[in-house]
Image (cartoon, helix red, strand yellow):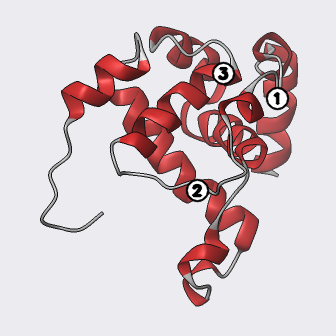
């Protein structure tokens, strides 16, 4: 996307579904977070080699939510109507259509379905253990 192009946020928001603007910013920032974790030295890679798969993105968004919101990760995502990994996919594909993200010809919405279960991924016991291990 060039600097000259403007983003039609209203179009993206209406296309994706019941997600607020904050959810889009979270996914965009979470993509950067995920790409950095997957590729480590991302700045040295050409643009096409910076791609992350939909599964990697979903798992990265889970980690990003936990890092950013801690024990409230699921609550925050739920407040944005993000309750399944499919929701990440809807936001991503709206951003692709809006020119904010790109995909390979192999990436599909189906790739976002059922990557992980939110109830399990954000269970308080699991989160507490992950947060404690990360802080040690």
Q: Which residue is mark 1?
A: 115
Query: Are the residues flagged by discs 1 and 2 in contact, CB closer than 8 Å?
Result: no
Q: In the picture, residue 122 is in which quadrant?
A: top right
Residue sitting at 57 percent across and 85 percent down? 46
| Residue placed most toward the observer, 38 or 103 | 103
In percent of the image, x 42 and y 28: which residue is there? 23
Above or below, 90 against 41 in this view is above
Residue furthest to the bottom: 44
**Marks 3 and 1 close (CB-CB < 8 Å):** no
Q: Position of residue 128 (x, y in %)?
A: 80, 26
Q: Residue 125, position in %: x, y?
A: 86, 17
Q: Quadrant of residue 25?
A: top left
Element at label 1: loop
Circle 3 is placed at which residue position?
86
Q: CA distance from mark 1 to mark 2?
A: 18 Å
> Against 30, is 34 above or below?
below
- Image-based side of 95 in relation to 110, left or right: left
- The 10 Å Cα crowd at callout 2, few under 14, some 14 to 19, many 20 or more, is some
Answer whether labels 2 and 3 touch (C-beta < 8 Å).
no
Residue sitting at x 69%, y 35%: 62
Q: Earlier in the sequence, mark 2 or mark 3?
A: 2
Residue at the spot of label 2: 33
The vertical placement of 96 against 19, above or below, is: below
């Amino acid at each position: 996307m060039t600097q000259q192009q403007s983003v039609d946020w209203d179009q993206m928001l209406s296309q994706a579904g019941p997600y607020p603007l904050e959810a889009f910013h979270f996914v965009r920032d979470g993509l950067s977070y995920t790409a950095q974790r997957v590729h480590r030295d991302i700045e040295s890679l050409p643009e096409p080699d910076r791609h992350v798969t939909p599964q990697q993105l979903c798992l990265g968004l889970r980690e990003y939510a936990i890092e950013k919101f801690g024990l409230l990760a699921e609550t925050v995502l739920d407040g944005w109507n993000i309750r399944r990994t499919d929701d990440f996919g809807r936001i991503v594909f709206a951003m692709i259509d809006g020119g904010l993200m790109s995909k390979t010809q192999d990436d599909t919405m189906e790739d976002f379905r059922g990557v992980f279960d939110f109830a399990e991924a954000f269970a308080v016991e699991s989160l507490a253990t992950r947060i404690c291990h990360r802080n040690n």
